[in-house]
Image (tube, rainbow, N blue to C red):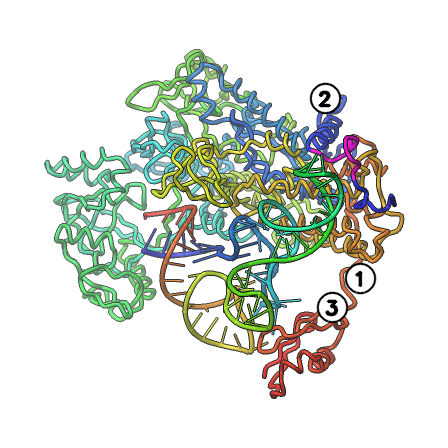
Amino acid sequence: MSATNAASAKPADSGDLSHRYTAAYANAVEERWQASLAHADGSYGHHQANPGEPGFDASKPKFYCLDMFPYPSGAGLHVGHPEGYTATDIICRYKKLKGFNVLHPMGWDAFGLPAEQYAIQTGVHPEVTTKKAIDNFRRQLRRFGFMYDWSREFATIDPDYYKWTQWIWLQAYSSWFDPTVKKARPIAELEARLTREDATITVENAASKKWSACSKREKQAYLDTFRLAYLGTQTVNWCPKLGTVLANEEIIDGRSERGGFPVLRMPLKQWMFRITSYADRLLEDLALVDWPDMTRTLQTEWIGRSEGAEIHFAIEGERDALTVFTTRPDTLFGATYMVVAPEHQIVAKAIARGNAELAKYVDWAKNRSDIDRQASKEKTGCATGLFAINPATGARIPVWTADYVLMGYGTGAIMAVPAHDERDFEFAKAFQLAIVQVVDIDGVAFTGESATSGEGRAVNSTSAQLALDGMTTADAKKAVIAWLEKQGIGALRINYRLRDWLFSRQRYWGEPFPIVYDAEGNHYPIAASHLPLVLPPLADYSPIESDTPQPPLAKARDWTHTTAGAAGVDAADLPPETAVVRETNTMPGWAGSCWYYLRYCSSKDASSFVSPEAERYWMLSRKKSASTMPAPTTYDAATCHAGGVDLYVGGSEHAVLHCLYARFWHKMLFDLGHVSTPEPFGKLFHQGLITSYAFQRADRSLVPTDQVSEVKEGEFVETATGQKVTQIVAKMSKSLKNVVNPDDVIAEYGADTFRLYEMYMGPLEASKPWNTRDIVGVFRFLQRAWRLAIDEKSGEILAAAQPDAKIERLLHRTIHKVGDDIEKLSFNTAIAAMIELVNAATRPTGLADPTHGGMTRDQLARFARVLWPFAPHFADELGARLGLHPAGGAGFFGSTWPTYDPAMLVDDEIEMPVQIQGKIKARLMVPAKAEASAIEALALTHADVIAAIAGRAVKKVVVVPGRMVNIVI
RNA sequence: GGGCCCGUGGCGAAAUCGGCAGACGCAGCGGACUUAAAAUCUGCAGCCGCAAGGCGUGUGGGUUCAAUUCCCACCGGGCCCA
């Protein structure tokens, strides 16, 4: 038997295949390599040095690859986690071989409700359960062999981390958005300017006062209206069940995103972020990043910029006008009534005039939950008894209130144009209000039976004051706005759907705000030198039952009641002995994830939230077109990438909230000079959801997987009843008993097989069902590759002495294709290419010289490096047995990606199909570089072609060199 | 209701500057090896048909020498926003 012929090395009858690549063998190999990454100093894994540290190579380009860090739940890793993590691990290993400095960190998003709820039930501190969950997650991630730089690991609950979360919040608190330069600036600059100019400001009760004449309190109140983090009274979404208020973003169809509980609206004083001041930049800068179109669209819609007009309607008998926002000022003549939200202050005035019916309606409407308000199709409302004047027509129009107008949108009041708005139309019909057509839409007749919406030409829109008839919608809008501005009763206005971000939560398990209040309720920041403000332990975590939200931290009386000096308030602001009370709300779960990618750059830095040098190195880089220029020191839009992180991979469920919040924080930090780039994430990618199979009865109810049997291929019945059920794809869930535990899969096949399977399932971005039966395919691939290289009896290398020309050629192609596919994140096709190579090499019958099958040691060494990003333990083991590195330690970590010869990618001769009328009739072998005319001549003289033409006249011959020939007759 | 995305063998999928549809894997069927099975190797395999051949990328149209790919309409599924 030739030792060069791996495939014919038939296994002996039994027993002594002690080096066969079985699951147990794979597990042993993997665990040995993983154990060797535990270093003597207690650290683990591969460390990537920062600039200035020993071992840092400044000549290499950087690649910062980020995974969305997980929330460490008690349930451990889900199979969905390793999907994205394997993808980034492959790219990072590849980039490492390609000569990059690679930053690939991991950490824990560890504040949040589940741990707090568990604490409420058990009394165990959330930190205890969370740290236990983190330990388990870390163990699982290491078992996958991901090459994270564990020296940079942290959790958002670490005081050393949230110290800086609090610090960043203080930056926002001490900043304002200057609209003239469209960026954040220190509020001290605003204060200095007001002092310098001795500006006249508006104080309480709309009185005007010189800055120098203002009291300290008045100055403070004025500055507070500018802070990027400010205390605002908002109608909030109060969720009694969760015991907290929620952001608009956390509510879906009137219920909490988490848990699906009802949400009530109530006014409350809360910490807010003035994210709306960044609306335009958040919108514009989406053009600077390489993100999925879907995600960009979602953020654009979420910000919801709309151009229109603000119009002030005079109210009979009232001093103040009623202001509305409309995107269709051109329909002003059609405004036949007005509607305000029940919470609108003008309603209170109307009630004060003694309108009992109105009071009754408002009470009823206010007590309706958002669910009821949105669910009811029937229009409800009540006339306020007030009348407004339509400035265009001079007509008296009634002011109504209705719950379909929400206080949170626009100004909480609308001018109703029933002829051209569906909801206004229904309302007008229900209450017999006038309907006047003012837009003639091409091809759509206005019948009075329904509203017509869209653009057209103005009709019925001319009065002594204003003439619009005949104008296009766009022109009419401009004309109306110009007229409103001239009259001083309105103006062009840009409105956003985006609201300011409610940042307070009535929760325990979150970052405390570094702020205290004096007896009068004035707020004072805690100096940075007193951070972190550590979360105090509690004995009882349960929510405080109350009509109003009561944060659990209020129970920590010893902590909340302190003095200004002890808390760390600047003595210039407040004498140190002054009694103060701490803020008892905490920050939401989003806080920690808004900047964690920055902390990874220098996660142990004690003197700043991120070391400026490390931040600049990892976040700032040149565009490809400017790659020959020296490394940048400051951002330059023409030559630098706007986004810092080179690749960010995570689920699309974070496409709006997390990715919008992080951008907002990043832009604030950018404006204040703390980070180098205007955007945090250059390229964003969403991996698809891993689903599972489930079974459905005829009535569409679902049956847990363990209650179903397969009677024959593809046919399933419910075991208990014998009734037929259909196999469908569904989300993994405990109730359906179709959740796959990664630990089990690794035990059965090894981590390398798990990694390969998830990458081979399909495109990374696609949602795909887990099919346990398919795993064996990639496992067999590894077994075949192993057998190709290793003698299963001795464990020694089994290599060909001479390279086979065909295999060498295929190897070059594989190196090329796998590298290309990794860059495109097309891992399934990369793996298919490697399988083809191994199949060809293990099938000596297909080779030119069957006695020289398999691969040489040199070929195996190149193959191992191609496989390494995907199945690192396997590849490192193979590398060690080939003598390329020691059997343990870094393996191929410091190696290079194999090169290929472009000449090997093209064949000398290729097969081309010849079609007649689009049907293939013959196949032609032609030289790869043959001219079209030569191919045509060859085709027309081919016997099968002549037969197929059967003497008919050839009208046209289309030759696409390298592709095909089509003959038209 | 509006917007976006997706429909390819029994299954996961591949191929889209328009150019041989179904690479690769699973499941399936046959053969070799084996007392047998597993494992391995090897062959077959879109559908109809003994074959020649025909039909095939959700359905119907269109553009083109040529359409999974581009355009229109519809059907089905998903996601987001109302």
Whether residue A902 is visible, yes or no, is yes
Callout 3: few (<14), some (14-19), or many (20+) C-alpha neighbours within 10 Å? Answer: some
Q: Which residue is mark 3?
A: A910
Write down the chain letter for disc 3. Answer: A
Sequence-wise first label, 3 or 1: 1
Residue A643: percent from left, percent from top:
59, 46
What distance separates the C-alpha of mark 2 from that of mark 1? 49 Å
Q: Is residue A593 left or right of residue A941?
A: left
| Residue A497 falls within the magenta-colored stretch | no
Q: From the viewer's perspective, is residue A4 above or below residue A719?
A: below
Q: Amino acid at mark 2?
A: Gly
Residue range corresponding to the magenta coloring: A11-22
Q: Amino acid at mark 3?
A: Ile
Residue A957: percent from left, percent from top:
63, 81
Do the residues marked 2 and 1 share a common chain? Answer: yes
For the N terminus of chain A, the image quarter is: top right
Residue A453: percent from left, percent from top:
28, 60
Q: Amino acid at mark 1?
A: Ala
Sequence-wise first label, 3 or 2: 2
Outermost residue, right direction? A801
Indicate the quadrant where residue A262 lies.
top left
